[in-house]
Image (cartoon, helix red, strand yellow):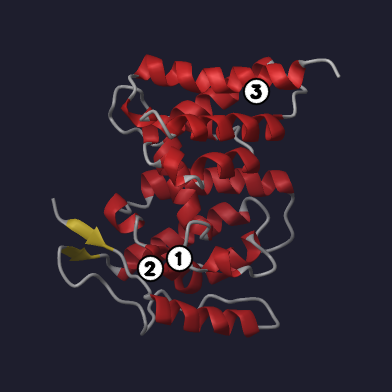
Amino acid sequence: MTVELFPRLDGFAADALWNEVARLCGPVEFEDVRHPSATFTATGGTRCNFDKLRRIRNDLVQLAREHGFPDTRGDEEVRQFDFRAARYLAEDAGIPACEACRKGVWAYFTLVLMPDLTDWRFPGRKRERWAGGIRNTFGVLWRRGYLIGADHNDGRGPGWNSLEPLTQDALVQIIERPDLSASPRTARTIASVWKRIRQENPGVPMEALTRDAIRNLTAYRVTQDIDGLGDNELLGRVSAVFNSALRNFSRPG
């Protein structure tokens, strides 16, 4: 199968465009899906056509409009947009995983294809949300969808029901820790256990509990290959660290 190649910005081009964005006093506006600084991988696939890029942009703009774009939006509108956009990017946008792992592709998304959506989603223009790193606005949404929601044909089916209720803090703890999110199976297991703990223990401070559990799971990983555990062993290990954290937060005083 031929890989579809997506446009990308190298570090120098992304920095130049970011500097232009940072200097703007007014809203950031979309101009065109084409940009003279955007390039493609020289070999190894077929270039994505610009009609498809326009469709991706139009679809995401429509999603954003349903949640308040371009006006001020509330926390729940943002959460719902993030979930729906993550699902769209992972299921419908047709971005190959090998291309989605390139930082330059997501820099193109934020700085060329959807600068107005990026500015709406993260007011204040923090560079990390525009550059092609782990916190890129659309790159992080794709990873959420790919790691937790998408069906990887492993017999477990899709995990959208586990992704949908996750809070922003829980998503940061899971997705932005490469040592825990290298495997979709591990990321999805953590998400499903988080969901169960929250459902069964209303009122428990999930943010603090999650950080405690993830810290202990990361420490355990130093001596144990978590990704190499069988399904039952993995579920047991993740459940153990969350149950231990739950007991700590359930003790009187």
Specify the quadrant of the image occupied by residue 247: top right
**Dot 1: what SS?**
loop
The amino acid beneath tag 2 is Gly
Observer-nearest of 111 and 131: 131
In the image, what residue type sits under mark 1? Gly
The residue type indicated by label 3 comes to Ala
Separation of disc 1 and disc 2 at Cα?
6 Å
Give the mark nearest the N terminus, 1 or 2: 2
- Quickly name the residue at label 1: 132
Labels 1 & 2 near each other (Cβ < 8 A): yes
Image coordinates of residue 11 in percent, x first then y, are 41, 76
Q: Which residue is mark 3?
A: 245
Residue 214: image x %, image y %? 56, 33
Mark 1–mark 3 CB contact (< 8 Å): no
Q: Quadrant of residue 197?
A: top right
Does residue 137 appear to the left or right of 23 in the view shown? left
Q: Earlier in the sequence, mark 1 or mark 3?
A: 1
